[in-house]
Image: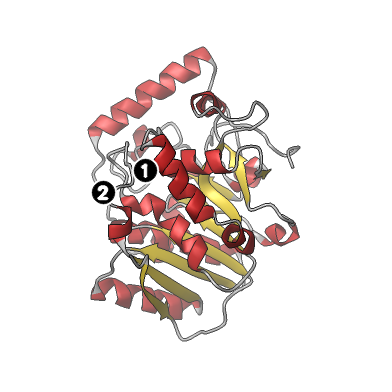
Amino acid sequence: MERLKEVIQFGKNKDEGKIRIAYGVDENYLRYVLVSMTSVIQHNKSVSFYLAMDDISDAAKIILDEFANKYNVVIILYLINKDCLKEWPLKHKELSLATYYRFFLFDSIENGKYVLYLDADVICVRSLDCLSDINLGERILAAVPDLERMNEQKKKLALSKDHIYFNAGVLLVNLQQWRSHGCLKKILKVLSERDGNLDYEDQDILNIIFDNKVRYLPVEFNVIEINGRSLSDCRLIHFASNPKPWNKYWCLNPQCNDWSNPIYKYYENECFKDEKREPADFYYIVKWIVKRLFYSMISGVKQYDADSYK
């Protein structure tokens, strides 16, 4: 079965930028991807974007083309055949199969050595030019360690003692090495061997495949725990918890503070002039707050500082 249905390029500019940014979403999340892309453009020159989706409406095509021309950037859309993933597991009902689209995207992007993958809930607040100084060599992947409590997951997955469980919301990928090492085949093998028994879907898969083989990036490239940090400590902020900044009850999230709230609104207003706010599922709000309170009582909520890890 063909995994790729179509490739569509948007914008009059045909020159792909020095900084390559990738996303994997369905159309429901396209609005938030555009906010993320706006934040990247604000702080970086010579940028191009790569999207993996399973389908796109004519209205969304017009939005992408207008966005690409407005900012004079290249946007390349890869339409994934969703039927290839219908047996792939989804434990978290708030997720869609789009969480796996990045795997096919890394296999499909032809130009460039590296691509930086971002979740749709990641915004950029400083330049990413320093990433060009990173040489992965023969390593395939660079990522930022997750919150310390998430390191418990490596025991469940039977990972190496020295491995630090990383978050998959920001990934620097060596495209040539990804393809030459047949990473997509390894992913399919993990899915078969684990029989869908994965707590954190794509993130667990990546930690299994790159067990003790990942290059760790400093926390500033994927700041999940905002409290206790200033804006100058961050390059990429990851709003990983619920409710999200675009939800009506975002103010209930402890990550909503006196600088994180206005910073997201700024980029959102740069991209959209309306005040659209999505309703948040109350179940997930309560669930996340209870979990956060529990972990803060037993060990605090901390994120690994991986500056010393290579």
Q: Residue flagged by tag 2: what amino acid is it?
A: Glu
| Percent position of residue 215, x then y | 68, 45
Q: Nearer the viewer, residue 92 or 255?
A: 92
Location of residue 67 by image quarter: bottom left
Q: Residues within 10 Å of mark 2 (few under 14, many from 20)?
A: some
Q: Nearer the viewer, residue 137 or 120?
A: 137
Please give the residue where the numbered disc 2 appears in the rendered image: 278
Q: Secondary structure at mark 2?
A: loop
At a point 44% along the width and 60% down the height, the residue shown is 104
Q: Secondary structure at mark 1?
A: loop
* Rendered view: 194 above or below 279: above
Location of residue 9 by image quarter: bottom left
Please give the residue where the numbered disc 1 appears in the rendered image: 244
Q: Nearer the viewer, residue 74 or 84?
A: 84
Snapshot colouring: secondary structure
Q: Are marks 2 and 1 in contact (CB under 8 Å)?
A: yes
